[in-house]
Image: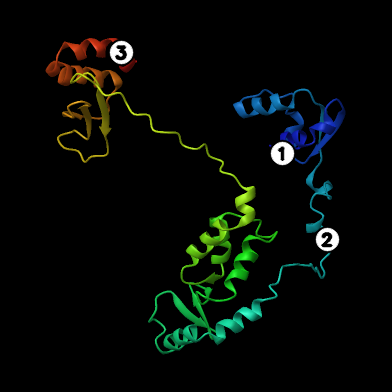
């Protein structure tokens, strides 16, 4: 809602002061007096509490300042557009033109335009998916990497952003590896940037059980094709003997039904020790 957003945006000027809100939305004039019938209206009204304002309706034809550009007299309308230009672009094109390997591919494509997938020739230059092709050992590549990564425009971005900027217009063999190695070797990035993720700790091994069917591991295998109505498997494995059971399940199943199936298929076969520990530690939790 524009009214709420505008008042919140200028709240540091409007709090504690009486002000007038002009709008061409006539129903907003009665917003504070009407009966609220939707949760959205209640939320908006709660955000306006504490402000002292009056809403005044202004018809569209009187609100000339809002769309002054669309009401200007017909005539010549000029704009000034600025855009960056690459000063070394001519040198790069001259280098591509003088490269023998690229010119050989251009000659082959002139004979057979469909001979190399993705490559085409435009105005005597070789393009791959509409990107200018450079020789992989071109002396301009280090300059390009520095321009797209180390300059204020590049902003020392990471590998992916630097690669995407270059890949918009350029292509050479081994481009991803070259960009990755350059970013990894950047001295500023290595000094100033830090890893934002918490380093992984050491693995904590589980204690080794001393009795079979004392410590079990359970897991579900999902997404199986239906067979007689079954489409999931509950896998129960004894951690000491590595003996396992596979119990078929049908959707939908709950924690209570799985617990009952565990008692029926596992506890029934492997003694009362599991049953006692299971009922005390897991039965109520699964049922809930």
Of the numbered discs 3 and 1, the one sitting upstream in the chain is: 1
- Tell which of 46 and 81 is nearer to you: 81
- Tell which of 60 and 90 is nearer to you: 90
- In screen coordinates, is 151 left or right of 135? right
- Point out residue 70 in the picture as x, y percentages from the top left corner: 78, 58
265 shown above or below 193: above
- The residue sitting at 59% across, 44% down in the picture is 194
Q: Mark 2 or mark 1: which is in front?
A: 1
- In screen coordinates, is 80 left or right of 163? right
Q: Which residue is mark 2?
A: 72
Could you give the CA–CA distance between mark 3 and mark 1, rounded to whole angstroms? 56 Å
Q: Quadrant of residue 184?
A: bottom right
Mark 1 secondary-structure assignment: helix
Rate crowding at label 1 as few (under 14), some (14 to 19) or many (20 or more) other CA atoms within 10 Å: few
91 shown above or below 199: below
Mark 3 secondary-structure assignment: helix
- In screen coordinates, is 120 left or right of 34? left
Residue lying furthest right in this view?
18
Of the numbered discs 2 and 1, the one sitting upstream in the chain is: 1
Q: Which residue is mark 3?
A: 281
Q: Which residue is mark 1?
A: 2
Q: Quadrant of residue 139?
A: bottom right
């Amino acid at each position: 809602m524009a009214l709420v957003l505008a008042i919140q945006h200028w709240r540091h000027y409007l709090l504690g002061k009486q002000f007038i809100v002009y709008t061409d939305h006539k129903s907003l004039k009665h917003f504070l007096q009407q009966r609220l019938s939707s949760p959205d209206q209640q939320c908006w009204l709660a955000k306006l509490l504490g402000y002292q304002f009056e809403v005044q309706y202004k018809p569209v034809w009187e609100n000339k300042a809002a769309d002054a550009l669309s009401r200007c007299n017909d005539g010549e309308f000029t704009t000034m557009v600025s855009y960056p230009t690459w000063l070394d672009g001519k040198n790069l094109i001259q280098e591509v033109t003088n490269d023998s390997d690229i010119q050989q591919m251009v000659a082959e494509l002139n004979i057979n335009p469909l001979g190399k997938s993705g490559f085409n020739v435009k105005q005597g230059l070789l393009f791959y998916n509409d990107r200018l092709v450079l020789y992989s050992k071109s002396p301009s590549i280090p300059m390009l990497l520095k321009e797209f990564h180390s300059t204020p425009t590049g902003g020392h971005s990471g590998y992916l952003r630097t690669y995407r900027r270059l890949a918009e217009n350029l292509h050479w063999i081994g481009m991803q590896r070259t960009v990755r190695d350059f970013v990894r070797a950047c001295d500023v990035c290595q000094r100033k940037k830090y890893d934002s993720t918490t380093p992984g700790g050491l693995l904590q091994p589980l204690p080794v059980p001393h009795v079979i069917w004392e410590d079990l591991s359970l897991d579900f295998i999902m997404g199986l094709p239906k067979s007689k109505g079954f489409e999931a498997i509950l896998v129960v494995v004894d951690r000491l003997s590595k003996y396992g059971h596979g119990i078929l399940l049908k959707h939908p199943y709950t924690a209570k039904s799985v617990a009952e199936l565990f008692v029926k298929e596992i506890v029934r076969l492997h003694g009362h020790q599991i049953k006692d520990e299971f009922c005390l530690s897991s039965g109520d939790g699964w049922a809930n």
